[in-house]
Image (cartoon, grey):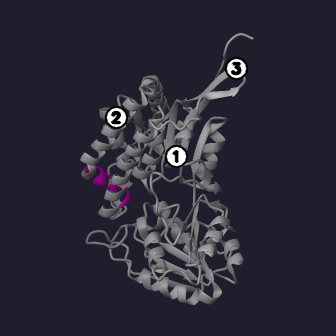
Amino acid sequence: MPQTLPAPSLTDPRTGRPRPAVAVGRETDVRATVAAARSAQPAWAGLTPRDRARRLLRFADLIEERSAEYVQAEQAGTGKPAAEAHGEVENCADLLRFYAGAVRADTAPAAGRHMHDRESWVRWEPVGVVAAIVPWNYPLMMAAWRIGPALAAGNTVVLKPALTTPDTAVLLARDAAATLGSDVLLTVTGDRDTGRLLVAGDVDAVAFTGSEAGGRDVAARAGLRRISLELGGNCPALVLPDAPEDTCEALVRAVTYNAGQSCAAPARVITLRENHDRVVDELAKAMSARRAGADFGPLNNPDQVARHDRILASSAAGVQHVADVAPGPGQEGGYWRPGRVLAGLAPDDPAVVEEVFGPVLTVQAADGVEEALALANSVRQALAASVWGSDTATVLGVAGALNAGEVWVNCHLDQSAELPHGGRGSSGHGTDMSVLALTEYQRPKTVTVRLGER
């Protein structure tokens, strides 16, 4: 679609150097893109589930065939190490294949006679045109989480990537046109105002992944239209005295994956006071082996760097363990930040109550399991959490008491297309992944027929 108003130059987060700008869509561009998606929607929805599934499978195949191009594009916008970017391309293709099969399973309530002399059934119909607005931390994977179920359910989608990471979204629209059909999946690039125009446009539903502030703005602008929000995490990890030996190493790996820029990353470690010093020491040892520039990537953009630095500067942590930074040649100007372990924190410390969104672990001590749960549930966000321990009854009890949409036991960030992911409270609402996500983009219609004469 036509684009206007060139954007400020983007930067490569690995080097800090400028890279080519993208166009910023404005009202005319957004309106034209949405109109094209609306024109294409009836034909796409009119396909049988089998035919939609076959096209989605071809789409997934093409993404894999062009995986090297997707990896390069993902790295250009995010700075992720090649292995991380390659894994996310594989996950994108896998998710599309999952929904190609899931939409054919038909999970609607069975038809039957629920009233005397009446036959009833439920039709699950697409909502229409879905606006999918995705963030810069996982530009390809978050796009897949949104477009997979929306497309499988018979909707057309207008995808709006973050300003700093448009690269893979442009590739998705190109390859969707070659496999799904013209205008079934479209991309409009731009800034926050572009996203606001899209939310206010002629769309039937909005799927937004991003900050709490952004989610509130979407909710205010969307009116009565359906919205699905996946917002911040600031997730706790409760480490009990009988936690497995590899607990601290696993938590450090999880919080440095994608440089900690994951809503579900284990940001807040909470342990019992009797175990606190040992946990801090083990976390510090594991973090010292992880180097920004060698084992994980940079922060994404200057705004994120400033936010990260502001929160850490305002923290009154009594103990700080800081790992090394080892950027490659020519990457010294990138947005690299070291892994950190912060301890000696008050419950209202900025590093605890705000989501740092970086390779940072805070450690808090509690006098017992009940107090540990209270600390875990004390922040606004309620996206995900983990509990680490060996006593089955205790860890399952803690898992049930944690206020989170997803809880891991003796692991963290382990996800699969078959399992739902979604938040509570300030982490938003709605479901990503699993067959449950299909209903985010469908409307049920009950049809009841009178049988015979009165």
Q: Secondary structure at mark 1?
A: helix
Within 10 Å of disc 1 (Cα), the crowding (few <14, some 14-19, many 20+) is: some
Q: Position of residue 275 (x, y in %)?
A: 59, 87
| The N terminus: image quadrant | top left
Tag 2 residue? 54
Q: Amino acid at mark 2?
A: Arg
The answer to whether residue 73 is magenta is yes
Q: Main secondary structure of the magenta part?
A: helix
Is 369 located above or below residue 39 in the figure? below
Question: To which quarter of the image does residue 79 belong?
Answer: bottom left
Find the distance from the CA under tag 2 to the CA under tag 1: 35 Å
Q: Earlier in the sequence, mark 2 or mark 1?
A: 2
Within 10 Å of disc 3 (Cα), the crowding (few <14, some 14-19, many 20+) is: few
Q: Position of residue 379 (x, y in %)?
A: 67, 66
Q: Secondary structure at mark 3?
A: loop
Tag 3 residue? 117
Find the distance from the CA under tag 2 to the CA under tag 3: 39 Å
Q: Position of residue 220 (x, y in %)?
A: 66, 42
Question: Residue at the right extreme?
Answer: 454
Q: Earlier in the sequence, mark 1 or mark 3?
A: 3
Is 231 located above or below residue 250 in the figure? above
Q: Amino acid at mark 1?
A: Arg
The answer to whether residue 39 is magenta is no
Tag 1 residue? 192
Is 183 located above or below residue 99 in the figure? above
Q: Residue at x 45, y 80 (%)?
A: 246
Confirm whether residue 18 shows in the render: no
Confirm whether residue 359 shows in the render: yes
Single out the mark in the foreground, 2 or 3: 3
